[in-house]
Amino acid sequence: LVMAMVMVMTSVHLRDHHHPLPAIALVLSLHVVGMYAFSVVSGRLADRWGRAPVITGGAAALLLSCLVAPLSPALGPTAAALFLLGLGWNFCFVGGSALLADQLTDGERGRVQGFNDLLVGAASGAGSLGSGALFAAAGFAAMALAAALLALLPLGLTWWWRATRQVAADASTAG
């Protein structure tokens, strides 16, 4: 959702600032590199550090990229923000997928992960549509701020998940 909102509207934002299409394509290509090139690394980090720290790091990267993206219409800062946006999405997606898989039996895994991917796609579609309307009504900075606020959601959910696990662990050792 957050990633799609900012990614989709960045090309329009850059075009509004008269950047040539090849430069815009390069910015979006760097974003896609951030989304996929480090999947093996983020998977290993999720195994080594745990799912929650990887998701938290990804959400922090999403938040930071949403706050940095509207600060300058120049290609360099925008490309850096979009790369970070892709990397944050990667950490959230890989960490979240691993966390989901951890909770499922072998018989459930394929069906539930497939449904999860459907929900991720639907959220991306909704983010794309919503960001266009918000961009048209209030501009790139307002849209990026709305995305930044939404980036707080994985941080809150991860905190809640860790807190409930700690309460359950405390209850099992006390009883």
Image (cartoon, grey):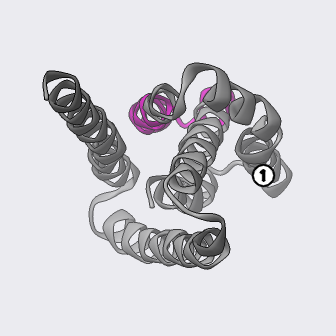
Q: Which residues are magenta?
A: 58-80
What residue do we see at 57% from left, 41% from top? 95
Q: Position of residue 7 (x, y in %)?
A: 58, 55
Give the residue furthest to the front: 175
Query: Does 24 sit above or below residue 84?
Result: below
Figure quadrant of the C terminus: top left
Q: Which residue is disc 1 drawn over?
A: 20
102 horizontally vs 67: left or right: right
Query: Does 69 sit above or below residue 76?
Result: below
What residue do we see at 49% from left, 54% from top? 103
Figure quadrant of the N terminus: bottom left
What residue do we see at 25% from left, 40% from top? 156
- Front residue of this view, candidates 95 and 11: 95
Q: Residues within 10 Å of mark 1 (few under 14, many from 20)?
A: few
Q: Position of residue 68 (x, y in %)?
A: 45, 29
Image-quadrant location for residue 71: top left
Image-quadrant location for residue 43: top right
- Front residue of this view, candidates 87 and 162: 162
What residue do we see at 73% from left, 50% from top? 28
Secondary structure mostly seen in magenta is helix
**Residue 70 covered by magenta stretch:** yes
